Amino acid sequence: MLAFRAYSWFLVRRLGLTLLTLWGLASLVFLMVKLMPGDEAQMAAGADASAAQIEAVRERLGLDAPVILQYFGFLGRLVRGDLGTSIVTLQPVLNDLEKVLPSTLELVFFAMLINLAVAIPTGIVAANRQGGIFDTVCRVTAVMLGGMPAFWLALVLQYLLGSVWRIVPISGQSSFGMAAPTVTGATAVDAIIALNGPAFLDALHHLILPAAVLAALFATQVFRTLRASLLGVLRSDFITAIRAKGASSRRMLVRHALPNSLNPVLTLSGTQAGAMIGSAVLVETVFARQGIGAYMFNAVAQKDSFAVLGSVMFIGTVVCLVNLAVDILQLLVDPRIRAAQLGSQTQ
Amino acid sequence: MTAPAIAAPAARPGLRLSPFEIFVVALVAFLLAIALFGPLVAPDSVYRSDIANSLMPPSFDHWFGTDDQGRDVFWRLIVGAQTTLLSAFLVVTLYSLIGVTIATVAAAGPRWLDETLMRITDIGLALPGMIVALGFAAAMGPSLQSAVIAMAITGWPITARMLRGIMRQTMEAQFVAGAQVLGVSKWRLMTKHVLPNSLDVLIVKWAGDVGTTVLVLASLSFIGVGAQPPSAEWGATIASARGFVSTAWWTVVAPGAAVAITSIAFGLLGDIIQVRRDPSLRGN
Amino acid sequence: MQIVHPMPAMPEPTPKYAPLVTTSGLTVDMPLGRDGNSVRIVDNIDFSIGVGERVALVGESGSGKSLTARALMRLDRLARLSGRIDFDGQDLLKLSEREMTRYRGSAIAMVFQDPMSFLDPLMTIGDQVAETLRIRGVGKAEARKRALAVLDELGVDRAAERLDAYPHEFSGGMRQRVVLAMALVGEPRLLIADEPTTALDVRVQDQVLDLLDDVSARRGLAVLFITHDLGVVAGFAERVMVMYSGRIVEDGEVEQVFAHPRHPYTRGLIKAVPRIDQDLHKLYAIPGAPPPPLARPSGCPFHPRCSESFDRCVSELPAVLNVGGERVACHLHDPLRV
């Protein structure tokens, strides 16, 4: 219906913005590298490197050159995928991160599922019975949950549900000996690949609490947004027209009110996907799961500076790409956004 | 995240406060009092170790028990309040100032400057704030100061964007055009009209932001790039108590609850101010 | 078609039409705040609309005309209705909500002022028009066919291609036709049009009115047309009812009312319409303003602004009287007046 030209123009613009953002991120990380106290070459070479080795590294990284050239060198290395080398694992940071990325994505995926599966129905019911008991309880809960530090909630629930009541495992991604052979690093996915039912269930068992904790904060946001949006739509004129057509309450709600209220929720969850990846740091460490967040945390604990900064770059990039994907998805879903972004034609 | 959370039960306009509002304001005032005067009234024992008494459960002597160094958890919380709250205030004030400055320059300056600054702000908005702050804090050497600076650097984009929008709107309002015709200088316009208009939005945001900043600050300390043990900052306290969650849950629950309560209280304060400013938001 | 047994103080149906809708003592109260107080917007009105008759309901904003129209379909959930609305023998106010939904869209339909805000932006117009039928269990293909037929009838060209278009792709006049189609596809017997032309420019206004005219004649559709524009009334309606502050003050055939308005308010309204053949220096407006519903004057609500009021008007609410084939609520026309 809409010109191919318009679509591609939008894509170009959006990609441009993403590239610009990534460039900004890279520049910030460069700044961080320069801010680090101590000799950069020494840190890169390692604690027990000889003077000669340190000089070699200094040359390789071009650390004697003026800052501007260093900057371009840095950008060049980034583009080639060189995020530095971990002092601890002695592996390129990128390799380390790639290995654990699927695990984080798996966690975020399930967290998003829980988020939407809980927040959307409660939001609908709360809006439909505005002012009722359910509504009030939900809103109070939302306020409470929204103010809690994620890591604290994780610790408390881990203790309660894991140690005391023993409903869920305390930590880790799989029980001893249960895991399917590692293909992606994401335990549930690996279990599916190996067609291993019990392993899959075990993986889910280990996922549920971390995913729920991660989802908590974001669910409160979705709940509030959906509720507000739905309330607004229910008050709007076209709902009256639908009723004038003789539609039942249920039909009006499901087929008309809801689709029109979902837009801000979609936008919100899109940005949440990126934020969740950032928050994964806290959740992964408390539950001793593998992931880019846990990697970063350990890097900080072990004062592995390059790993930390490499993680910052990596995580930041992942977040940007996720946001881009979401924007494109939104475009395909809502005809109004399509019209606004691409230009509509009146008939 | 500063959308009003709960509609205050019907409060009459004017200075009469509803019971709910009174409660929130009192809570915030209480927290502020602790932050300011806490360390003055705390007993000296808070700073000393007393291993013999470590990890004791809550009792009459120690309301929240003792931690792994034998220090009274309750008093440590009181002392830590100063660090946590004042750091949060500092961070929010800093980045609000940065945000206001950038917004003012963008709104008042030439078009190209506005565009450039807004592009930079967009980039800032697109990046995950906590991760970037983490990076800076780690790079500068983990410490409370690093965390504060890092958070100030990453916190301004939202404020800047919001304020610039409002300033632009105000500037395009009729009365400003009228004043310009009368020859009022742009500088005077900004200071006398545009800025005061933006001020109350800023205050609402400031209150809510303190709430979220306390959370982020605690998170950064927990990860290890903020306040370092033996600081009594709440996040650092939770970090050092982490290993004892199963044996001495109070060492973890107490500081976390403190963070939660503070964060919620300030968030609600922000909501209350917002609803009072613009009653149409009530019930939302 | 039943003949309703005439009740005291009920309007006498115009001879040419059998009554379709008759209200008796219809009152609409809207709730205020949370403590159960309410304000009376529509105060005890009686009127009748015949089969295929075209009636206009005129009044300033706040007179209660919109609420009256919506009350006929019980659209406002918050409104408290009392009295009786007799539609073809059934008292609508006695129906449960569920039963009422069966009347909406099929027996009585409504079109609104601003078509854009009354169309679901996320649904194709074909689906929206067909929805009125789908709600009643008509199959998808059949509903689509009938939707197409109605759109065609209303002059939407290339309707077949446009069925899958979205509302925002249409111009104002087209959207109004879509909204009309949505209302007509269910073959209602009464169409309520709430200021359908106010948001449109004059040219499009004419088109829509012609359309309504055409459709109503062809289908024998009764139309209740709500407006504040007397020009539109003159061009379209056979009968006009004038509302003021929640009451019907005059009700009669358009030509008669316009030529010899009996109520001072109606006179004022007509006088206020500028005419090309007048030599005016100043536009006339009825002095004063309509009273807010919470602060209605005693007696006749119009008396503070009426140049012909006398002491009875201040103390006593005028009853609706039959005067020369019209109904008027004014003490001036009381043959027994003191």
Image (cartoon, coloured by chain):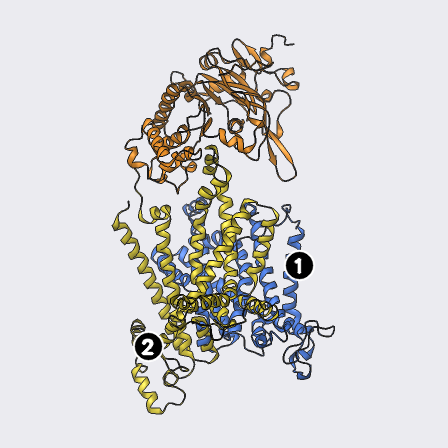
Q: For residue B178, what is the image quadrant?
A: top left
Identity of the residue furthest to the left in this view: A5
Cα distance in 3D space between marks 1 and 2? 53 Å
**C299 vs A313: above or below:** above
Element carrying mark 1: helix
Chain under disc 2? A
Please give the label number shown on residue B231: none
| Chain A drawn colour | yellow
Identity of the residue furthest to the right in this view: B60
**Residue toward you, B116 or C142:** C142
Measured as percent of width and height from the top left, residue B169 is found at 43, 49
Answer whether residue C197 is visible to the viewer in this image: no
Chain under disc 1? B
Element carrying mark 2: helix
**B208 vs B238: above or below:** above
Residue B120 lies left or right of residue A208; in this view the side is: left
Measured as percent of width and height from the top left, residue C52 is found at 44, 18
| Chain B drawn colour | blue
How crowded is the residue under tag 2: few (<14 C-alpha within 10 Å), some, or many (20+)?
Answer: few
Residue in the image at 64% along x and 20% along y: C299
Q: For residue B81, what is the image quadrant?
A: bottom right
Disc 1 designates what residue? B26
Instruction: Look at label 1 and name its amino acid.
Output: Ala
Answer whether residue A25 is visible to the viewer in this image: yes
| Chain C drawn colour | orange
**B93 vs B165: above or below:** below
Disc 2 designates what residue? A67
**Residue toward you, A49 or C13:** C13
Measured as percent of width and height from the top left, residue B150 is found at 47, 70
Residue in the image at 47% along x and 40% along y: A251
